[in-house]
């Protein structure tokens, strides 16, 4: 399937499904069963910074950045409904807000060498072209700027609960686009190894500072271990990974 077809399919699915994700997996949270920004402090001081959110969704991560004192809040998202919702969520921000509907694989006119911080919370893994997306992000940042992103750990959906036990039902080492079970096979996401993300960032010019896949479990366990995100699965493989890097 061509990248343009995948983008079209995924956009259609997001327009239908966006509402169930409003406000979910947003800063200061990085994703399921992992540490938060309150604990990790990957961004440091945000006050007075120009920030860009790749896959900004409903705008709740940008809202967090605004509360922390960011000077400019920029967001990019493929989904019309997400952008419209983000506009509503961010309408009372004191910071300047600019939201743009566009796939992350393209630069829709964002300024080069402008941002202090670029980040993506559980969105960047949707890209159909990882190298191109990282190259754009590198260009958007000022020298010395910070890039932080989180995504579902690539081991997570390889493991499935069947007949009272967890088994690996997909290869970790075979990469490429595939229909995603978590989206009832109505969306296509590229499976990539963790090393693929890391090496693509290095190739784009980034200096890696941290790679985090620590697991943080709640006191109570999930009642249903077959859920997409269950504590039982998180006891075996991380649900989330986080990478912090900087521009030379």
Image (cartoon, grey):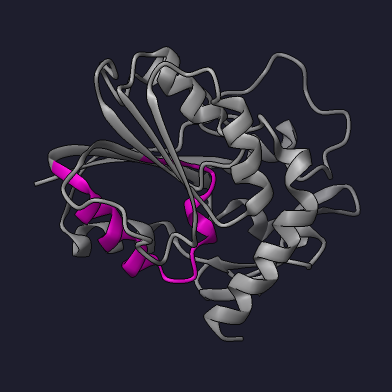
- Quadrant placement of the N terminus: bottom right
Position in image of residue 49 (x %, y %): 25, 25
Is residue 139 one of those drawn in magenta? yes
- Looking at the image, is 33 positioned above or below residue 79? above
Left or right of 74, for residue 4: right
Task: Answer yes or no: is residue 37 visible.
Answer: no
In this view, the residue in front, 113 or 216, is: 113
Q: Residue at x 48, y 65 (%)?
A: 192
Q: How many marks?
A: 0
Left or right of 208, for residue 133: right
Position in image of residue 196 (x %, y %): 37, 64
In the image, the segment drawn in magenta is 119-142
Position in image of residue 81 (x %, y %): 69, 48
Position in image of residue 219 (x %, y %): 70, 13
* Furthest-bottom residue in this view: 1
Q: Residue at x 78, y 67 (%)?
A: 186
Name which quarter of the figure residue 71 lies in.
Answer: top left
Q: Residue at x 16, y 48 (%)?
A: 113
- Looking at the image, is 217 positioned above or below residue 159? above
Task: Answer yes or no: is residue 227 visible.
Answer: yes
* Furthest-right residue in this view: 163
Name which quarter of the figure residue 42 lies in.
Answer: top left
In this view, the residue in front, 185 or 106, is: 106
Is residue 24 one of those drawn in magenta? no
């Amino acid at each position: 399937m061509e990248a343009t077809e995948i983008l079209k399919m995924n956009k259609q699915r997001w327009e239908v499904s966006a509402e169930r994700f409003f406000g979910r997996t947003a800063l200061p949270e990085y994703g399921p069963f992992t540490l938060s920004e309150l604990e990790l402090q990957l961004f440091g001081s945000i006050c007075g910074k120009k920030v860009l959110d790749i896959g900004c969704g409903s705008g709740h991560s940008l809202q967090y950045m605004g509360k922390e004192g960011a000077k400019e809040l920029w967001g990019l998202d493929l989904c019309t409904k997400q952008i419209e919702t983000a506009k509503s969520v961010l309408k009372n921000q004191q910071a300047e807000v600019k939201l743009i509907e566009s796939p992350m694989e393209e630069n829709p006119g964002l300024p080069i060498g402008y941002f202090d911080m670029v980040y993506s919370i559980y969105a960047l893994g949707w890209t159909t072209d990882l190298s191109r997306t990282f190259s754009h992000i590198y260009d958007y940042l000022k020298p010395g700027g910070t890039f932080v992103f989180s995504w579902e750990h690539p081991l997570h959906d390889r493991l499935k609960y069947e007949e009272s036990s967890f088994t690996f039902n997909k290869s970790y080492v075979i990469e490429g686009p595939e229909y995603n079970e978590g989206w009832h096979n109505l969306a296509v996401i590229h499976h990539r190894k963790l090393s693929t993300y890391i090496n693509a960032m290095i190739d784009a010019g980034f200096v890696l500072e941290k790679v985090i896949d620590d697991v943080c479990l709640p006191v109570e366990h999930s009642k249903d271990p077959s859920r997409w995100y269950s504590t039982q699965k998180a006891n075996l493989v991380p649900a989330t990974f986080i990478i912090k890097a900087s521009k030379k």
